[in-house]
Amino acid sequence: MNSISVFAPATVANISCGYDVLGCCLNGVGDQMNVHRSSSKNVTITKIEGAKLPFEAHKNVASVAVMAMLEQLNDPSIGIDIEIFKKIKSGSGIGSSAASSAGAVWAVNELLNRPFTANQLVQFAMEGERIASGSAHADNVAPALLGGFTLVRSYSPLDVIKLHTPPDLYFTVIHPQIEVKTEDSRRILKPSLPLKNAVTQWGNLGGFISGLYTEDYDLISRSLSDIVIEPLRAILIPKFKEVQQIALENGALGAGISGSGPSIFALSKGKATAEKVAKGMRQIYKETSIGFDVHITSVNSAGVTCI
Ligand code: HSE
């Protein structure tokens, strides 16, 4: 096989209680990438549609991630051409850079007859995140590569776990058309937190994961709280509190900032509730002059796939 086309999915990171460790892969929202073996012995970005992104290999997250992978293989004869068709906007909070990095390394791994497992690919895709935001976090690239909900149990050494998904969970995601750079929204965070807040947050993270495995939607709901990151970042997102409030009033299990924002996610039991939540979110944003998209999606348990 010398060419492959892949769907590179959007992801929701943090999921309120799991800053930098928890993430989930979305169905139906994502980019397309065409990846080819070439005789050039280089990694080249040959086409970008749908976004203004750099063509220089050392600046584009997709090529940076692939170069990290090829370096590990230590085979200088491999050349790769990458075409990117972006649907996920940069700075949207639903893993735009992660989709490009994850999609590229997954595709190249297929072309090379799978020298790496999906878990091993996470480390390479993280290099794309490093140049996109200044930090090699894995909570978007891991769910994009493994599908479903994932937990980064440890960064050093990297230990990523795919979690169980209850059947009835639906995401509603509203994406206000403003850009929030991950780098900026990380810079406003505090480097330390009071011990009692850490206790609350790790209690909720444990509760959320237990709720996924026991399919206990009420426990999931009680655990969807963020007292560490959300209070600092909410100011970056117009109408955040109102959207969160209306999501809860319409029956969502919980709602919070998607990744580093500005997208806001809600989790609901059942599609009908997720649709009601979407209606409420739209109502709030229609009162503003800000354009927006709303996605209602189930959990994508496959991650990046061949199309
Ligand atoms: N965990 C990262 C953050 C996700 O919140 O900065 C960025 O998409």
Image (spheres, rainbow, N blue to C red):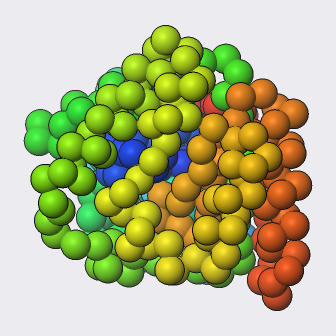
Q: Is residue 162 left or right of residue 147?
A: left
**Residue at image location 70% in from the left, 73% down from the top:** 176
Question: Which residue reaches farthest top?
Answer: 214
The percent coordinates of residue 55 (x first, y second) are 50, 75
Task: Name the residue at the bottom extreme.
Answer: 289
Please tell me in which quarter of the rendered image ligand 1 is found: bottom left
- In the image, residue 40 above or below residue 185: above
Picture residue at 61% right of the left edge, 68% below the top: 241
Residue 236 visible at all: yes
| Image vertical order of residue 302 relative to residue 24, above or below | above
Where is the N terminus found, in terms of image quarters?
A: top right
Quadrant (top left/top right/bottom left/bottom right) for the C terminus: top right
Q: From where the camera sits, is residue 102 visible?
A: no
Residue 182 screen position, x and y as percent: 42, 71
Q: Residue at x 24, y 53 (%)?
A: 197
Q: Relative to the observer, which residue lies in front, 155 or 221?
A: 221
Give x and y (percent) for residue 143.
47, 37
Dividing the picture into quadrants, the one containing residue 179 is bottom right
How many numbered marks appear? Answer: 0
Left or right, residue 256 beside residue 89? left
x and y percent of residue 105 in the render?
Answer: 43, 43
- Of 4 and 135, which appears nearest the observer? 135
Along the viewing direction, whichever of 259 and 194 lies nearer the viewer: 194
Question: At 36% across and 45% down in the image, what residue appears?
Answer: 18
Vertical placement of 185 versus 273: above or below? below
